[in-house]
Image (cartoon, coloured by chain):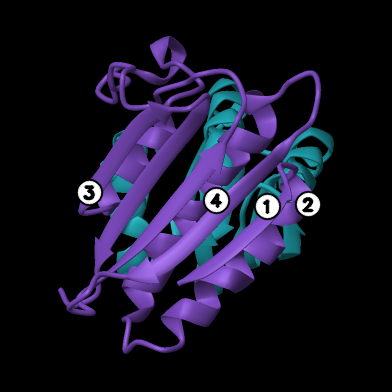
Chain colours: A cyan, B purple
């Protein structure tokens, strides 16, 4: 997994390239916990994300909890296969997916 | 059939994935099925690595093979840790709002939904969990 964050004022877009799994999720977790100060709109760009396991879903739910207090969060470019994972786990009803 | 006995640790997940991938390479498995099988393998193996022997460590055996007619892949996980039937637990309520949602339980829920069959038995002091995924949609 490689993170490509881009900050424009109070908006942050994080392009996530590769796999969010048990091994890589801690890196995303650390990034989120250290980078969201003052951010009002957090966008995850999943165009290059090929895989997510429950370890990754957990981090997205943590990010959603943080952002629901200080602004909003959304996911863009989610593939059909990943959308199926969000649907099965009910996370698609919590997260804003466009 | 392919088999691997390895330390039940998160670091061993790569070797387990390679074993499964090698079997799938011999089939015309779709990318979607590949991803789903990889996901189930991760969820189950990480559970074993995290809880089966905690706080000690131990080994797990993973067996991968095709059904006799070649239409499905079967993966069996065997450990000698504390008896634990992941299927016995009730599914988490995924309709609850964020603040009321439990943190755990999503992994096994995923496994049950994306695999065609999941079976658990406890025999001779071993946890034996088998997942089956059909290769054709």
Residue shown at 61% from the left, 41% from the top? B46
Q: Chain of mark 3?
A: B
Choose top left, top right, bottom left or bottom right for residue A98: bottom left
Question: For numbered disc 2, what is the local secondary structure?
Answer: helix
Which disc is residue B117 wearing? 3
- Please tell me if label 2 and label 1 are on a single chain: no
Q: Residue furthest top?
A: B100
Q: What's the residue at 41%, 57% (across, down)? A: B75
Circle 4 crowding by C-alpha within 10 Å: few under 14, some 14–19, many from 20: many
View extreme (right): residue: A34
Q: Nearer the viewer, residue B78 or A85?
A: B78
Contact flag, marks 2 and 1 (Cβ < 8 Å)? no
Q: Is there one chain holding both mark 2 and mark 3?
A: yes
Q: Is residue B50 above or below residue B119?
A: above
Q: Chain of mark 1?
A: A
In the picture, the disc for residue B42 is: 4
Q: Are marks 3 and 4 on the same chain?
A: yes
Q: Which numbered disc covers residue B11? A: 2
Q: Nearer the viewer, mark 1 or mark 3?
A: 3
Labels 1 & 3 near each other (Cβ < 8 A): no
Residue tagged by mark 1?
A: A12
* Closer to viewer: mark 2 or mark 1: 2
Foreground tag (3 vs 4): 3
Q: Chain of mark 2?
A: B
């Amino acid at each position: 997994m490689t993170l490509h964050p881009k900050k424009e004022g109070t908006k942050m877009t994080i392009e996530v390239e590769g796999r969010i799994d048990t091994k890589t999720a801690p890196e995303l977790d650390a990034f989120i916990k250290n980078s969201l100060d003052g951010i009002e709109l957090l966008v995850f760009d999943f165009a290059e994300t090929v895989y997510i396991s429950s370890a990754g879903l957990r981090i997205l739910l943590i990010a959603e909890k943080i952002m629901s207090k200080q602004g909003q969060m959304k996911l863009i470019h989610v593939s059909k296969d990943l959308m199926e994972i969000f649907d099965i786990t009910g996370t698609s009803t919590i997260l804003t997916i466009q | 059939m392919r088999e691997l006995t390895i330390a039940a640790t998160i670091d061993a997940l790569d070797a387990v994935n390679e074993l499964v991938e090698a079997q799938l390479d011999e089939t015309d498995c779709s990318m979607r099925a590949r991803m789903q099988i990889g996901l189930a393998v991760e969820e189950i193996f990480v559970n074993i690595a995290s809880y089966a022997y905690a706080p000690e460590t131990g080994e797990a055996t993973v067996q991968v093979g095709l059904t006799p007619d070649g239409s499905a892949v079967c993966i069996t996980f065997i450990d000698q840790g504390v008896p634990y039937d992941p299927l016995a637990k009730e599914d988490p309520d995924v309709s609850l709002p964020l603040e009321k949602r439990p943190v755990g339980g999503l992994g096994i829920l995923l496994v049950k939904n994306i695999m065609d069959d999941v079976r658990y038995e406890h025999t001779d002091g071993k946890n034996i969990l088998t997942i089956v995924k059909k290769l054709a949609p």
